[in-house]
Image (cartoon, rainbow, N blue to C red):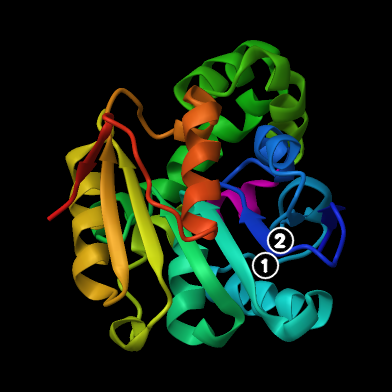
Amino acid sequence: MYIEEFGTKESKCIVFIHGGGLSGWMWDRQVEDLKDFYCLVPDLPGQGKSKGLKPFSIKDSAHQISELIKNKVDGGRAHVVGHSLGAQIVVQLLASSPEVVDRAIVNSALVRPIQGMVNLIKPTVKLTIPLTSFHWFARLQARALSVPKEYLDKYFDDSKTITAGTLEQILVENASFSLPEGLERCNVPTLVLVGQKERSIMLNSAKDLVSAIPASKGYLVQGVGHGFSFEDPKLYNEIIRAWFTDKQISSERLRVLL
């Protein structure tokens, strides 16, 4: 698995796990602001510079992240941040390997399966995958994900090189994911975030996570959607720093879940 490293190993480590169909570049604004941390930013299997690694699964990706922390981080423990598909991987990691996580941030993790959608994924991918080679289609997709204009070329590079098989695996894994067994025994301090503009199923998933993880807190973030880290990186980074330094998170835009 391709990994980029930022900062020095003597600093506390944060592992950033990107969303589906993207790659590690989505965290550029975070690692730039969090230079006093040792940041590890992997490209997930089948995506970005790890596109040669197949197949993709949430469980296998969580295992690889666990091994990454054990092998690369002094003491074998790190903070972990995940967005969307990456957030689902963090949830799996908390259930299967909580011993490698100090504190976690789970941003927009779907944990309510959409079974009716699974049957539509293969024909939908077959229709849309040829469009990924067109710049206009990438612009539409990037806009839906709140990807800033300066990252459009990077997004286009990722979208035009992802294979139909990998895209299908990502979408099926995402739509099928549910609360994993063992999560109720996790004692890792976990912050659950969801955007005010997201779909109701995402809000309900966030509430499910707060209920399931004993040491968790949850916030609804006013004024943002699924692309919170892109839409307001300043607030996002402030939340990361506060949570990982065990400081109070203070913003009038945060509403407590549950």
Query: Are discs 1 and 2 less than 8 Å apart at CB?
Result: yes
- Quadrant location of residue 245? bottom right
Q: Residue visible at 45% across and 23% down?
A: 144
Q: In which quarter of the image is the N terminus?
A: bottom right
Q: Does the magenta stretch include residue 205?
A: no
Instruction: Note whether 120 is above or below 146 in the view shown.
Output: below
Query: 230 or 242, which lies in front?
Result: 242
* Visible residue check, residue 114: no
In this picture, residue 157 sits left or right of residue 109: right
Image disc number at residue 195: none
Instruction: Note whether 46 is above or below 163 in the view shown.
Output: below
In this picture, residue 113 sits left or right of residue 12: left
Q: Residue visible at 75% across and 49% down?
A: 36
Residue range corresponding to the magenta coloring: 162-170
Q: Is residue 165 magenta?
A: yes
> What residue is pinned by disc 2?
45
Q: How far apart are marks 1 and 2 (CA)?
A: 7 Å
Q: Residues within 10 Å of mark 2 (few under 14, many from 20)?
A: many
Q: What residue type is labelled 1?
A: Pro
Query: 9 or 131, which lies in front?
Result: 9
Q: How crowded is mark 1: few (under 14 residues within 10 Å), some or many (20 or more)?
A: some
In this picture, residue 139 sits left or right of residue 242: right
Q: Which amino acid does label 2 sit on?
A: Pro
Q: Nearer the viewer, mark 1 or mark 2?
A: 2
Label 2 secondary element: loop
Instruction: Note whether 185 is above or below 74 in the view shown.
Output: below
Residue 194 lies, in percent from the top left, at: 32, 43
- Quadrant location of residue 118? bottom left
> What residue is pinned by disc 1?
55
